[in-house]
Image: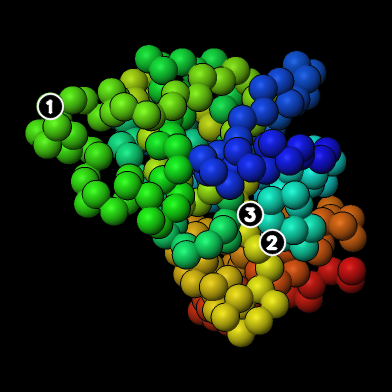
């Protein structure tokens, strides 16, 4: 899948892209089935009561079939166009969401470094918990950031609810849609059920220089499974590694190696599969 110049310009300008109906209904069926297996078998899905968010990190890594999303030509095309074809897979979370998330970014990088691919597995509208973004907020010099406003305090500061901030975009989705956004982009969700299903794939640029590798290491300190309290013995599960074709391994190699250096006490050393 190749992005158009208009799509690339849109992403650069606004910090997000939406892909309606990227996956067909029959694909959505197995994606949901595998997602539920992961949350129920490897996570705490069985004890979810809606009082708080249930999360697991990683997600696709626990399913050989979900791991093939990292081999999918559509995912590879979108990600390679934005990050380069040697991008790293930086894990991802799976969720039964409950309640609002509030406005927040996932990063504050001085330039494009990381993106999030978000899969929403229930129909979501602006009133039922869909993703909202502040367009352009990925830029560190944007007024969204330089104003110094805490957008979650907009009722007290501006007299408007955080759900009604002018310029915010509600990205209503159905299962099969994909939303991609820059880690720097401010995003939120408001309202909705106490069991909103969603999982992500986090991707970032490969480090080629000393500065680039340091940025990868910094990412692993904040975003890998152990950083979220999930100790799985390394960056990835054996499932995603052992079922990987050579093309996938290119996206796993650097983080596998760097995780052992960043988190030596939480890494069980294992040989990396042959490329």
Instruction: Report the disc number at residue 232.
Output: none
Neighbour class for label 3 at 10 Å: few (<14), some, many (≥20)?
many
Dot placed on the residue nearer the N-terminal end, 3 or 1: 1
Labelled pair 3, 1 in contact (Cβ < 8 Å): no
Q: Is residue 1 above or below residue 264?
A: above
Q: Secondary structure at mark 2?
A: strand
SS class, disc 1? loop
Q: Nearer the viewer, residue 35 or 104?
A: 104
Residue 195 location in percent, x, y?
44, 24
Inter-mark Cα distance, 1 to 2: 42 Å
In front of the other: 78 or 231: 78
Residue at left 9%, top 33%? 156
Disc tally is 3
Q: Dots 1 and 2: beta carbons under 8 Å?
A: no
- Taking depth in this image into account, of 151 and 10 the one nearest to the observer is 10
Which quarter of the rendered picture does the C terminus lie within? bottom right
Residue 172, given in percent of the width and then of the height, sits at: 51, 19
Q: Is residue 189 above or below residue 60?
A: above
Question: Residue at label 2?
Answer: 88
Which of the marked residues, 2 or 3, is nearer the chain's N terminus? 2
Q: Position of residue 215 (x, y in %)?
A: 54, 73
Q: Earlier in the sequence, mark 1 or mark 2?
A: 2
Q: Mark 3 highlights which residue?
A: 203
Are the residues tagged 2 and 3 within 8 Å (C-beta)?
Answer: yes
Q: Which residue is mark 1?
A: 159
**Any part of residue 77 in sight:** yes
């Amino acid at each position: 899948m190749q992005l158009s110049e208009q799509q690339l310009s849109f992403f650069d300008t606004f910090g997000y892209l939406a892909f309606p109906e990227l996956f067909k209904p029959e694909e959505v069926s197995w994606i949901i089935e595998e997602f539920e297996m992961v949350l129920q078998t490897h996570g705490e899905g069985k004890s979810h009561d809606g009082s708080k968010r249930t999360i697991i990190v990683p997600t696709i890594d626990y399913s050989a079939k979900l791991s093939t999303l990292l081999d999918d030509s559509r995912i590879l095309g979108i990600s390679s166009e934005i990050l380069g074809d040697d991008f790293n897979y930086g894990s991802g979370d799976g969720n039964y969401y409950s309640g609002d998330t509030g406005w927040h970014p996932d990063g504050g990088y001085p330039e494009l470094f990381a993106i999030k691919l978000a899969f929403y597995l229930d129909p979501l509208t602006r009133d039922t918990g869909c993703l909202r973004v502040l367009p352009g907020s990925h830029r560190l010099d944007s007024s969204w950031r330089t104003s110094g406003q805490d957008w979650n305090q907009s009722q007290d500061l501006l007299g408007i609810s955080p759900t009604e901030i002018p310029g915010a975009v509600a990205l209503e989705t159905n299962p099969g849609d994909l939303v991609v956004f820059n880690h720097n982009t401010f995003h939120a969700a408001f309202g909705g059920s106490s069991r909103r299903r969603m999982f992500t794939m986090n991707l970032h640029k490969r480090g080629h220089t000393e500065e680039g590798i340091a940025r990868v290491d910094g990412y692993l300190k904040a975003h890998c499974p152990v950083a979220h309290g999930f100790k799985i013995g390394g960056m990835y599960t054996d499932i995603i590694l052992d079922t990987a074709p050579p093309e996938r391994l290119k996206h796993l190699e650097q983080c596998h190696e760097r995780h052992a250096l960043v988190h030596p006490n939480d890494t069980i050393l294992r040989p990396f599969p042959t490329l």
